Structure formats: structure tokens, C-alpha cells
Image (tube, grey):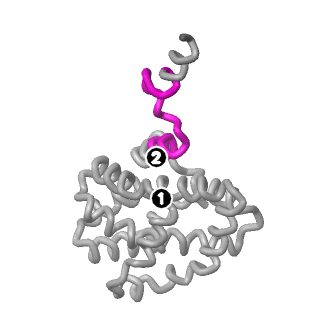
Amino acid sequence: MDITQLLGGDLGKQVIAGISQKTQTTEQETSSVIQTATPVLLGMLKKNAETKTGASNLLGALNEHDGSILNNLGNFFGQENTSDGQGILDHILGGKKKTVEQSISTQTGIDASKVTHILALLAPIIMGKLGSQAQSSSGGIGDLLGNLMSGMDSSSAGGNILSSVLGQATGKGSSKKGGLGSSLGGFFKS
């Protein structure tokens, strides 16, 4: 099962309706942000899990987010506190958080402050979904994330944002002529 199925069916409708109500956005706006953000968040989780420490930290977090949130969304949406979601986003996105939020805002046309609020509500739900899947998965965390991302289109808005962020994180995408490499090349030629 890929995570895009989270948006379908009754559970997806509950998530979208609950987030819309909390953020005072339309369900269409909320759905647009979720569809754009989900591949970015999962891709960044997958990137973080590529190291042994990152995978271990993610598995520890998934033990805390066991999926019980999915069974009690009414209670979750009844709370005013988004600190858990903000903490998850800080960990997943690190220094790229504002860039990701602004990119999603630009792609969807939704105000960046509302995108920030939607993501803070979405992050614990995604972690809950991952946690419930991890309990029933026999493979590693990388396999689990790969399976959940399998139905996603890498050329979508979220896929493009993820590529951009990963390019920045790894130094790719900064192939402007005349950079440090050119300077050193010129230096060694003299």
C-alpha cells in the first residue's frame, strides 16, 4: 500500500476535514497542500534513514508514533498544540524547513503560514501511518518508505520540491559556472 491511499477513503476524508477546520482552509486547499507535501516529507524521511543513526532514530520515533493517532483523529484535532508536529518537521526537514514550506506555498497558492500549520498537523499523522506500517512490516525502514512512496509521481510538484531540496542538501543542483570549482581550476592553471 502506498501512502497516497491515506488520502482516499474515510480516513483521508477525516484527515482533510479535520486539518481544514483547524487551519481555516478549504478542503481543496488542504488536499492540495497534503498531496504536494507528502512526497517531500516521505522523501526526506527516506534520505534521513539512509544512515545507520538516521534509521535508528526514525525507528525509535516510530515506536512512539504507533498508529494510535489514526484511531482517534477527533481527539487529535480537538487539541490546540502543534509542538509535536513542529518537532517532527524540524527533525525531518532540518534547515530546509522554511524552504520547503515556501516552495509548497508557491506551488499550491496557499499562504505560507497556513502551509506551516497544515504540515504541523499532517506530520504526526504521517508518522502514525508509518508507525502502524512498521509494526506489520518485515523489511527495513528503507523498504517500508520505498513501498509507501511507490505510487507517487516523481515529476509532481512535491517530487520537484523534493528533488530541489535534496539537490541543495547534497550539493547537487549548484552547478553554476564560475563557482569555487572554476576558481580553483583557474588557480591551478596559473
Instruction: Name which residue lies at 50% across and 40% down.
Output: 167
- Marks 2 and 1, the one that precedes in the sequence: 1
Q: Secondary structure at mark 2?
A: helix
Magenta region: which residues? 162-182
Q: Residue furthest top?
A: 190
Q: Is residue 1 left or right of residue 183?
A: right
Q: Residues within 10 Å of mark 2 (few under 14, many from 20)?
A: many
Q: Position of residue 60 (x, y in %)?
A: 65, 75
Q: Which image quarter is the N terminus in?
A: bottom right
What is the distance, in whole Å, between disc 2 and disc 1 at their CAs?
A: 9 Å
Q: Amino acid at mark 1?
A: Leu
Q: Residues within 10 Å of mark 1 (few under 14, many from 20)?
A: many
Which numbered disc covers residue 19? none
- Give the camera-side residue of 80 and 143: 80
Looking at the image, can residue 141 be seen? yes
Looking at the image, can residue 10 be seen? no
Does residue 28 lie above or below 123 as drawn?
above
Instruction: Name which residue lies at 54% across and 71% down.
Output: 127
Q: Secondary structure at mark 1?
A: helix
Q: Position of residue 97 (x, y in %)?
A: 41, 58
The residue that label 1 is drawn on is 93
Does the magenta portion include 5? no
Residue 15: name its quadrant.
Answer: bottom left
Q: Position of residue 37 (x, y in %)?
A: 42, 56
Which numbered disc covers residue 165? 2
Does residue 61 lie above or below 68 as drawn?
above
Q: Are marks 2 and 1 in contact (CB under 8 Å)?
A: yes
Q: Is residue 63 left or right of residue 41?
A: right
Q: Amino acid at mark 2?
A: Val
Instruction: Name which residue lies at 37% across and 78% down.
Output: 82
